[in-house]
Image (spheres, helix red, strand yellow):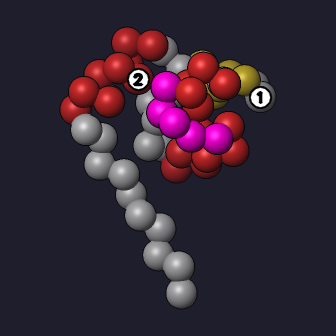
Amino acid sequence: MQDVADILGMTKPGVYKWLKEGVIPAYKIGSTWLILRDELKETLRAGADVKQSEET
């Protein structure tokens, strides 16, 4: 997970938040997240539209 955080310039908690929100393409198997390198690269190339949560 640290590798993904480094690539994205984020913290690990931020990566987990994006995983749960579906921003980062991944698969959850039990308690383990599986992030496929090629899918992550394609998402980055496509400029994934990040959903902004409303805070009021």
At 54% from the left edge and 87% from the top edge, which residue is drawn? 56
Chief secondary structure of the magenta portion:
loop
Q: Residue furthest bottom?
A: 56
Query: Which sits earlier in the primary sequence, circle 2 or circle 1?
Result: 1
At 41% from the left edge and 64% from the top edge, which residue is drawn? 52
Which portion, as a residue range, is magenta?
Answer: 7-11
- Taking the image as shown, residue 14 lies to the left or right of residue 50, namely right
25 versus 20 height, above or below: above
Which residue type does callout 1 highlight?
Ser
At 32% from the left edge and 29% from the top edge, which residue is drawn? 43
- Taking the image as shown, residue 56 lies to the left or right of residue 13, namely left
At 60% from the left edge and 20% from the top edge, which residue is drawn? 3
Residue 13: x and y, percent? 69, 44
Residue 27: x and y, percent? 56, 25
The residue tagged 1 is 31
- Taking the image as shown, residue 8 lies to the left or right of residue 17, namely left
Q: Residue furthest right?
A: 31
Residue 21: x and y, percent? 52, 49
Asked which secondary structure carries label 1, the reply is loop
The residue tagged 2 is 40
**The quadrant where residue 47 appears:** top left
Instruction: Give neighbour class at mark 2: few <14, some 14-19, many 20+ (Cα, 10 Å).
Output: some
> Is 10 in the magenta?
yes
Residue 55: x and y, percent? 53, 79
> Is 15 in the magenta?
no
36 versus 10 height, above or below: above
